[in-house]
Image (spheres, rainbow, N blue to C red):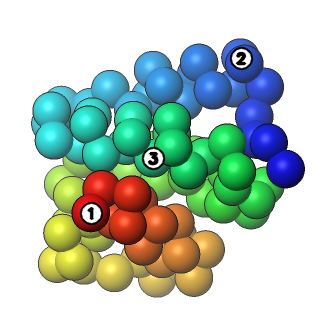
């Protein structure tokens, strides 16, 4: 399964631009490397992650906090693997 229309990916790419350069790099890497093969559930969860504030996303990615929603936890873990 390939994910996302070109328009959707372009919107997500724009939303990956954050106030923290570190987040830009990690989120864009996931978008480019893992998102195209992600399930529709994971694509939706990634879009929801991008709606969060930078400190919250950063806390999830460094393991300081854990999302309450299982689908977000799954995508956060995948983002962390892509960045490893």
User: Is residue 7 toward the left or the right of residue 72 in the image?
Assistant: right
Query: On residue 64, which mark appears?
Result: none
Residue, far right:
1
Q: CA distance from mark 3 to mark 1?
A: 11 Å
Dot 3 or dot 1: first in sequence order is 3
- SS class of the residue under badge 3? helix
Task: Select label 3 or label 1 by which is in front.
Answer: 1
> Residue 20 appears in which quarter of the rendering?
top left
Q: CA distance from mark 1 to mark 2?
A: 28 Å
Relative to the observer, which residue lies in front, 13 or 34? 34
Q: Which residue is mark 3?
A: 30
- Residue 75, image x, y percentages: 52, 66
Q: Which residue is mark 1?
A: 84
- Res. 48 visible in picture: no
| Residue pictured at 42% horizontal, 73% vertical | 77
Q: CA distance from mark 2 to mark 3?
A: 17 Å
| Residue pictured at 51% horizontal, 36% vertical | 32
Rendered view: 12 above or below 10: below
């Amino acid at each position: 399964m390939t994910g996302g229309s070109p328009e959707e990916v372009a919107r997500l790419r724009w939303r990956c631009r954050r106030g923290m350069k570190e987040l830009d790099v990690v989120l864009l890497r996931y978008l480019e490397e893992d998102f195209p093969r992600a399930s529709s559930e994971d694509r939706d969860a990634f879009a929801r992650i991008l709606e969060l504030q930078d400190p919250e996303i950063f806390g999830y990615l460094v393991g300081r906090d854990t999302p309450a929603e299982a689908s977000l936890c799954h995508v956060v873990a995948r983002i962390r693997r892509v960045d490893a």
